[in-house]
Amino acid sequence: MSDIKFTSYTTADFRNDLDLDMFIDAVERSAPIWVDEMKGRGSLKFSINRVWNKGEVFRVIMTYEYKDKAAYEANVKFIETTFGNNKEFQKYPE
């Protein structure tokens, strides 16, 4: 673990268990597309975990590890361009 120089994380909340499960499924199914892209930009590891809270909380935490700050910045740009600015990823199913 001493090679890891930069770590970031984000959380995502969902309306219900089904939406959360659909998100995890989409991440797992799409991984072959974006994993190599992120590794090529210096990503070392990605993990997604469900946060188990009491009550009606449906949350995941995604953790990213990078070789350095430049790799982090390159991957943030890739994520924003690929997912953040893509209207298909912004749709909320009704």
Image (tube, rainbow, N blue to C red):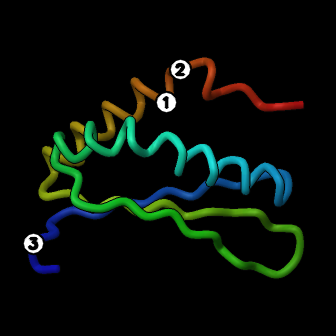
Q: What's under tag 1, amino acid-wise? A: Phe
Q: Residue at x 72, y 48 (%)?
A: 22
Question: Which structural element holds mark 3?
Answer: loop
Disc 2 designates what residue? 86
Mark 2 → mark 1, Cα distance in angstroms:
5 Å
Query: With respect to residue 51, does 6 lie above or below?
Result: above
16 to the left or right of 63 = right
Q: Position of residue 77 (x, y in %)?
A: 31, 31
Q: Secondary structure at mark 1?
A: helix
Mark 3 Cα shell of 10 Å, populated few (<14), some (14-19), many (≥20): few
Q: Residue at x 13, y 58 (%)?
A: 67
Q: For the residues marked 3 and 2, what is the alpha-carbon distance in whole angstroms?
A: 33 Å
Q: Residue furthest top?
A: 87
Q: Is residue 33 above or below residue 63?
A: above
Q: Which mark is residue 28?
A: none
Are there few (<14), some (14-19), or many (20+) residues within 10 Å of tag 2? few
Q: Residue furthest left?
A: 3
Percent from the top left, x then y, of residue 59?
69, 63
Q: Position of residue 38 (x, y in %)?
A: 27, 42
Label annotation for residue 3: 3
Residue 92: % across, % down: 77, 31
In the rendered structure, are the residues bearing label 2 and label 1 in contact, judged by CB atoms less than 8 Å apart? yes
- On the picture, is 89 further left or further right than 93? left
Residue at the spot of label 1: 83
Q: Specify the quadrant of the image occupied by residue 55.
A: bottom right
* Amino acid at dot 3: Asp
- What residue appears at the point 11 percent right and 79 percent down from the top-left corner? 2
Q: Earlier in the sequence, mark 3 or mark 1?
A: 3
> In this rendering, is residue 29 above or below 87?
below
| Residue type of the residue flagged with mark 2 | Asn
